[in-house]
Image (cartoon, grey):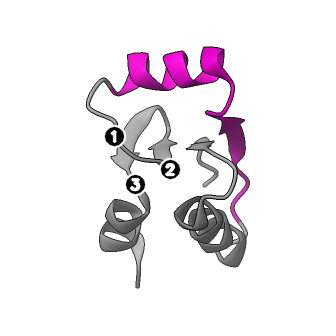
């Protein structure tokens, strides 16, 4: 079962890298959007107005949250 994974990330974000490493370890493909770009940042804020940190992770268009939310929800 493949899932649509989207990660809003910024450069020099260690939690963003850890989130990508998590998906890599599960052999899951993901799309990364650079929130360094003001247009992408605005899109991220539209999708999650409460976002205060990156990464912001969406799976199948559902907000998961940040890295710690991801690990709490999906770690074995």
Question: What residue span does the magenta drawing correspond to?
Answer: 28-48
Tell me which residue sits at (30%, 72%) in the image: 72
Dot 2: element: loop
Residue 1 left/right relative to 69: right
Report how far apart the C-alphas of labels 3 and 2 lie in the structure.
Answer: 5 Å
Which numbered disc covers residue 55? Answer: 2
Establish if 24 lies above or below 55. Answer: below
Residue of label 3: 66
Q: Pointer 1: residues within 10 angstroms few (<14), some, or many (20+)? A: few
Residue found farthest to the left: 50
Establish if 23 lies above or below 37. Answer: below
Residue of label 1: 52
Tell me which residue sits at (49%, 26%) in the image: 44
User: Marks 2 and 1: which is nearer the front?
Assistant: 1
Report how far apart the C-alphas of labels 1 and 3 lie in the structure.
Answer: 10 Å
> Which is nearer the N-term, disc 1 or disc 3?
1
Tell me which residue sits at (40%, 85%) in the image: 76
Q: Is 40 one of the magenta-colored residues? A: yes
Which is nearer the eye, 46 or 61? Answer: 46
Q: Are marks 3 and 2 in contact (CB under 8 Å)?
A: yes
Establish if 30 lies above or below 48. Answer: below
Q: Percent x, y for residue 40?
A: 62, 22
> Which is nearer the N-term, disc 3 or disc 2?
2
Dot 3: element: loop
Image quadrant holding the N terminus, namely bottom right
Q: Pointer 3: residues within 10 angstroms few (<14), some, or many (20+)? A: many
Q: Percent x, y for residue 75?
A: 41, 79
Residue 22 left/right relative to 55: right
């Amino acid at each position: 079962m493949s899932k649509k994974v989207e990660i809003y990330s910024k450069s020099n974000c260690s939690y963003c890298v850890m989130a990508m490493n998590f998906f890599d370890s599960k052999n899951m493909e993901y799309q990364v959007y650079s929130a360094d770009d003001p247009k992408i940042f605005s899109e991220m804020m539209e999708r999650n107005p409460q976002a205060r940190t990156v990464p912001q992770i969406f799976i199948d268009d559902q907000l998961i949250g940040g890295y710690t939310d991801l690990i709490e929800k999906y770690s074995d």
